[in-house]
Amino acid sequence: MVKAKELNFFALIIALIAITIWLLLASKGLGLTTDAKAYLYAAQSFREKGEFLTPQGYYTNWTPLLPFLLSFIPAKVLFFFTLLLNLFLLYVLIHKIISFRFWQTICYLHASFSIVFMMIHFFVWSEALFLALLLAMIILFLQLLEKETSKIFYALIVLSNLLCLQRMAGIFFVAAFALLIAYYFSWGKAFRYGILSSLGLGLWFVRNSFLQDKPDFLENIWAVSMYDSLLGYAESTIEIFFSTIGLPEWLLVIALGVLLLGLGLYARLERNLFVLYFNFVFYLAIMLALSMNIEHESDRYLSPVMPLIMIIFWKRLSVMQKEKEKIRSRFRYVLLFFIIAYNLLRTYFYISQWYNFPPLEMH
């Protein structure tokens, strides 16, 4: 855990600005979409009738944690505290990975001011809390690698169940962590973790089996072609760093491959980085294999793992100190300027749009 004397007060200022922006946006209401309305309807039905419903019938297309929380916590309160939690967990993870104070600050600025980070806390979606649970799991797992204790292991299992009950995609991370546990500890421990971490989602599927003949989530698999899925995720990943406007499709795919290869070669050298990289690549591979994204939604699907690739990227730039890297070491500051400037401008553009034209606002 971060000690008081190690606190980066520039990061504190960044967090306060991010909170202020959110409060400004939320003053006009939170953003609503079709699934956001389903969460709120299910929350109301659970509060009033004790069961999860949608206007069309039973609530089966999503998992129950978010509407359960919304049934007794107002949306603005829940998302405000989720924002605070994510800002804190982001800082803890960045502080754990990156040693140099300056690069901690840059990474934190990039991650907390990215438009996708702002977006998932402004819209009533499940991704914000999902991100918090995933960051907490990664931090716990890194602690488990430092000191193996039953307390941390079972805390990881509890968080894994909550992750799956927040979004079904949580099961992909259960598989990823199970493989990491098998690699660093044992297959027996991995099997125990996998079974216990899947119990909550398994019970939810049993509940749904009494209400429907065919699971709703099957309709989300292979919703687009694998090529379109690849393009969507390539564009969203590259846009973490640079604009993709005007870039040909083939260049987007090549850029994604080069980025993942370069960061992967570096991440393999450090255990903590490898954990982050493995979670990102494993999740991306599953989402690509199942083509689980739709047009213009790739940012949202990738939002839980975007901070992971950002941290690896800034960690790599932070260690360009050697004599043979002198030219690249100087170039990194040029890179830094363009990446941060692009992200701040992009975030400003979207936030201005949301503030002036609230998307189906909820007061």
Image (cartoon, rainbow, N blue to C red):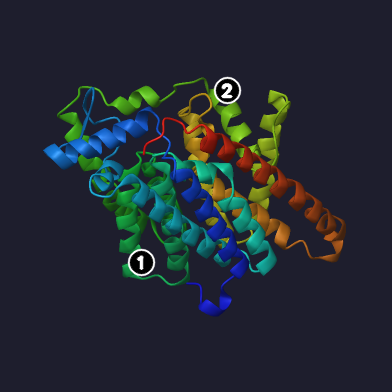
Q: Quadrant of residue 105?
A: bottom right
> What is the x, y in percent for residue 278?
53, 49
Residue labelled with disc 2: 227
Q: Earlier in the sequence, mark 2 or mark 1?
A: 1
Q: Is residue 345 above or below residue 212?
A: below
Q: Residue at x 49, y 58 (%)?
A: 87
> What is the x, y in percent for residue 151?
32, 69
Q: Quadrant of the C terminus?
A: top left
- The answer to whether any part of residue 97 appears in the image is no
Residue labelled with disc 1: 152
> What is the x, y in percent for residue 11?
59, 64
Q: In front here: 279 or 110?
A: 110
Q: Amino acid at mark 1?
A: Ile
Q: Is residue 103 above or below residue 281?
A: below
Q: In front here: 246 or 223?
A: 246
Q: Secondary structure at mark 2?
A: helix
Question: Left of 256 or right of it: where is 296?
Answer: left
Question: Left of 284 or right of it: where is 147?
Answer: left
Q: Residue at x 48, y 28 (%)?
A: 293
